[in-house]
Amino acid sequence: MATVPPKRKEIYKYEAPWTLYAANWSQRPDRRFRLAVGSFLEEYNNKVQVISLDETAQELKASSMFDHPYPCTKIMWIPDNKGIFPDLLATSGDYLRVWRAGEPDTRLECLLNNNKNSDFCAPLTSFDWNEVDPNLIGTSSIDTTCTIWGLETGQVLGRCNLVSGHVKTQLIAHDKEVYDIAFSRAGGGRDMFASVGADGSVRMFDLRHLEHSTIIYEDPQHHPLLRLCWNKQDPNYLATMAMDGMDVIILDVRVPCTPVARLSNHRACVNGIAWAPHSSCHICTAGDDHQALIWDIQQMPRAIEDPILAYTAEGEINQVQWSSSQPDWIAICYNRCLEILRV
């Protein structure tokens, strides 16, 4: 008789040996409950772990671990929902690194450094991996620039594909540090991206016309904007948040400079934003008040008073990620814990 796999729980929890910050879901269809998480230690030696759900034991376990210089500011798996590309993940910190996932050994494929002529590097605050063309990665840096990298996956030599990268373009994106970058799905999904930074602005760029950019929003008090996140189903909408801010601002690119909604139920600063992968009107926000809140924004531009779902964690939530391959699962990180929640 075939054994029936045990019924899934609503919440799985993994406790790491150190505080966690960066996290991301794998998108491969054959690796459904797999995430990568990065340690946050205020020293050079940090770690990245690949965490998988052991279906039989019904618990999250580390399947691979590797060293990482400084904490990762972001981790992303290659946006490959068909499983046709090499099994890669990228991390940002002092540089952009691309790794090939393996169990137990994950190995470095390439280190992408744009400051060849300097002894100093300008740390990368974030990056985004283009979903339409996974050979494109955009990085944001404290040196006011964004860099668009082209990746090449070489022919198979022996048993390994060699991954290398080159700078396609580098541009001064802001007047101060750039804190986040994200490709938009508009216009084919390959050429448009936006960035936010310490100057308090959201700016939009088109790789085909880099001589100018569009300012979509400026914070009235010029507070630094830390994160931006595009709606996955409707490329007109994006969300952003200010440093130490308790609100998440929803913007409509068709109506620049005026927020179309403000989500303001958090009682402490917001640290993370994740749009639903499968719905244009749901977004999750998480913050220092231990809360992860899911909002339904379909009544915009009427005010959105309250979230439709709230989850209280046992600590300040510093990361939230919504799984694109399984839209009913959200991951959060707080203290040393990763939790995945069924929504």
Image: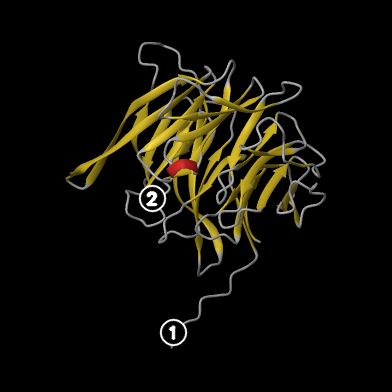
Mark 2 vs 1, N-terminal side: 1
Crowding at dot 2, Cα within 10 Å, few <14 / some 14-19 / many 20+, comes out as few
What residue type is disc 1 on?
A: Ala
Q: Is residue 11 visible?
A: yes
Residue at the spot 47% in from the left edge and 60% down from the top edge: 32
Q: Locate the N terminus and report the quarter of the image it occupies.
A: bottom left
The quarter of the rendered structure image containing the C terminus is bottom right
Q: Is residue 49 left or right of residue 261?
A: left
What residue does disc 1 label?
2
Count of marks placed on residues: 2
**Label 2: which residue?**
104
Mark 2 touches mark 1? (CB < 8 Å): no
Q: Is residue 244 left or right of 276 when viewed as pictured?
A: right
Quick check: 75 above or below 299? above
Q: Nearer the viewer, residue 75 or 315?
A: 75
Rendered image: mark on residue 248: none
Residue at horizontal 76 percent and vertical 22 percent from the top: 221
Secondary structure under the numbered disc 2 in the rendered image: loop
In the image, residue 53 above or below residue 303: below
**Above or below, 53 relative to 65:** below
> Where is residue 73 shown, x and y percent of the image?
54, 33
How far from the left and from the top, in percent, is residue 212? 49, 21
Q: Tell me if I can see residue 18 in this picture.
A: no
Label 2 amino acid? Pro
Q: Position of residue 201 (x, y in %)?
A: 64, 25
Extreme front residue here? Answer: 254
- For the point 56% across and 66% down, which residue is it? 58
Distance between the alpha carbons at the discs numbered 2 and 1:
29 Å
Task: State the image quarter where residue 147 is shown.
Answer: top left
Q: Nearer the viewer, residue 172 or 9?
A: 172
